[in-house]
C-alpha cells in the first residue's frame, strides 16, 4: 500500500493539492485495503491518512487497514472532516464519485478550496502489481472451471437460459469467487443477437447457438470471458461465421502488447471482420480494461487514444449480432506484456458442439 500512497501523493503534488478526499469504494479499497468502502471515505495528505467510517466497521478497519487513522464518523462526517482539514488550502475531490448535493455540502462546510478531479486514482489502478495480477489469474482460473463443468454436466437440450445463468452464478461462488463480476449472460438461438440480452425462459434445442458471457470477483478482482457453442450440431452459416469471429479475436489477442494503441487493436479486429463481410454486425468496442471494476479505462475502441502499457489487463471480445439469425462472441482476458500478452482465460475457443 505504501507505494500506492506515494504515487497518490506525487499526483497530489502535481495538482498542487494539500489533501485529497476519496469517496469511490473501489478507490478506497485500492489505497487502504478497506473493503467496506460504500460506507467510508479517505482523506489523504502528506502527513496523515484518515479513514472515516462508523462503529459497524471499527473492527474491520483494525484488521484491514490498521495504519490508517480512524475518524469515527459516518460519511460524509462534515463536522469531523472540517476539523481534520482545517489547515488545508486546496482539497481535491472525486467529482465523479459524489453527488451534486454532497459536493455542495462540502463546499459550504469546508474552508479549503475544493478542486474537482476525475479518475486520479483510476489512472494509478490501470497498471496492476503482481498481487493484483495473481488475483485476476485466479478469478480467470475459476471461470475456466465453471465453463468446463457446464459443458460436461449442464448444457443440454431442455435447459433454459435462466437455469444456465443461475448455475454459472452458483458455481462461481462455490469455486471461490466473492460474487459475479456482472449479471451473467446466457442466451440461445436468435436471442444471441442481443449483445447484452437478459437470460429468459427459452430452452435449448438441437441446432441452437448458445453464448455465455460471465466472470467473478476473486478477492475483489475480476475476470471476464465469453464463449459461444453449438447445441447438437453447427448448422448453416454458423461454422463459417464462427471461424471469422475466432480469426478476428485471435488477431486482436496477437496484437496486444505494450506500446500498441487501443485504437490500433480495434481497427485490426474490425478490418478482419470487414474482410469476411461481417463488419456491419460488430456493434461494440473490441474490449475494455478491468480490475477492481469490470469496466475500467482504457477501452479497446476506435475512439481511444490510449497506449497499452505493461501489466494493464484488458479483454479482447469481438462479436457479430444478426437480427433474426443470432450472434457469436468470443472473449478472453489478457495481461499486457512488453512483447505480447498473457492470456489468462484458457477455455477452448475452437467450435464446440455439445
Image (cartoon, grey):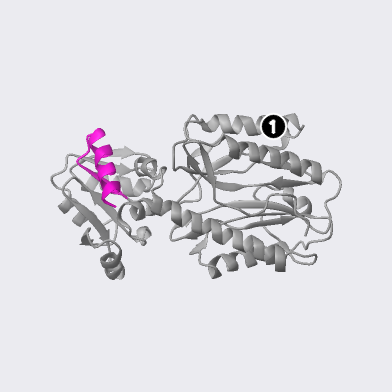
Residue bearing mark 1: 272
Viewer-side residue, 142 vs 18: 142
- For this view, does 316 lie left or right of residue 306? right
Position of residue 57 relative to residue 83, above or below, is below
Query: Is there any visible trace of residue 324 in the rendered image?
Result: no
User: Which corner quadrant holds the C terminus?
Assistant: bottom right
134 or 53: which is nearer to us? 134
Secondary element at image label 1:
helix
Which residue is more in the foreground, 82 or 66? Answer: 66
* Percent coordinates x, y for residue 211 in the rendering: 70, 53
In the foreground, 267 or 97: 267
| Residue 293 location (% of width, % of height) | 47, 51
In the displayed structure image, the side of residue 296 where residue 347 appears, left or right: right
Image position of 13 with respect to 58: above or below:
above
Judge the density around disc 1: few (<14), some (14-19), many (≥20) Cα neighbours within 10 Å: some
What residue is drawn where x is 66% and y is 66%? 149
Could one spot residue 209 in this view of the protein? yes
Classify residue 283 by image quadrant.
top right
Residue extent of the magenta highlight: 1-22
Label count reads: 1
Identify the residue shown where x is 17% and y is 48%: 85
Q: Is residue 121 magenta?
A: no
In the image, is 121 to the left or to the right of 320?
A: left
Q: Position of residue 299 (x, y in %)?
A: 52, 38
Amino acid at each position: 500500500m505504501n507505494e500506492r500512497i506515494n504515487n497518490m501523493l506525487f499526483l497530489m503534488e502535481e495538482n498542487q493539492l494539500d489533501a485529497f478526499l476519496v469517496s469511490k469504494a473501489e478507490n478506497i479499497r485500492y489505497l487502504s485495503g478497506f473493503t467496506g468502502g460504500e460506507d467510508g471515505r479517505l482523506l489523504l495528505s502528506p502527513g496523515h491518512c484518515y479513514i472515516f467510517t462508523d462503529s459497524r466497521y471499527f473492527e474491520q478497519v483494525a484488521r484491514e487497514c490498521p495504519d490508517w487513522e480512524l475518524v469515527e464518523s459516518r460519511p460524509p462526517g462534515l463536522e469531523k472532516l472540517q476539523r481534520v482539514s482545517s489547515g488545508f488550502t486546496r482539497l481535491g475531490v472525486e467529482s465523479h464519485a459524489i453527488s451534486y448535493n454532497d459536493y455542495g455540502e462540502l463546499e459550504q462546510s469546508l474552508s479549503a478550496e475544493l478542486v474537482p478531479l476525475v479518475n486520479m486514482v483510476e489512472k494509478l489502478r490501470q497498471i496492476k502489481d503482481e498481487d493484483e495480477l495473481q488475483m485476476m489469474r485466479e478469478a480467470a482460473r475459476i471461470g475456466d472451471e465453471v465453463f468446463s463443468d457446464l459443458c460436461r454436466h449442464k448444457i443440454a437440450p431442455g435447459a433454459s437460459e435462466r437455469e444456465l445463468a443461475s448455475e454459472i452464478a452458483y458455481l462461481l461462488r462455490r469455486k471461490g469467487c466473492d460474487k459475479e463480476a456482472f449479471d451473467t449472460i446466457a442466451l440461445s438461438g436468435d436471442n444471441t443477437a442481443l449483445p447484452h440480452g437478459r437470460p429468459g425462459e427459452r430452452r435449448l434445442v438441437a441446432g441452437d447457438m448458445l453464448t455465455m458471457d460471465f466472470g467473478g470477483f476473486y478477492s475483489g478482482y475480476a475476470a471476464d470471458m465469453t464463449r459461444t457453442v453449438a447445441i447438437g450440431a453447427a448448422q448453416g452459416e454458423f461454422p463459417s461465421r464462427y471461424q471469422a469471429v475466432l480469426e478476428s479475436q485471435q488477431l486482436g489477442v496477437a496484437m496486444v502488447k505494450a506500446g500498441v494503441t487501443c485504437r490500433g487493436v480495434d481497427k485490426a479486429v474490425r478490418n478482419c471482420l470487414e474482410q469476411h463481410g461481417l463488419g456491419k454486425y460488430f456493434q461494440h468496442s473490441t474490449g475494455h480494461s478491468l480490475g477492481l471494476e469490470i469496466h475500467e479505462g482504457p477501452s479497446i475502441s476506435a475512439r481511444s487514444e490510449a497506449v497499452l502499457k505493461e501489466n494493464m489487463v484488458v479483454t479482447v471480445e469481438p462479436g457479430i449480432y444478426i437480427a433474426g439469425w443470432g450472434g457469436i462472441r468470443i472473449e478472453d482476458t489478457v495481461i499486457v506484456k512488453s512483447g505480447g500478452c498473457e492470456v489468462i482465460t484458457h477455455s477452448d475457443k475452437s467450435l464446440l458442439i455439445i
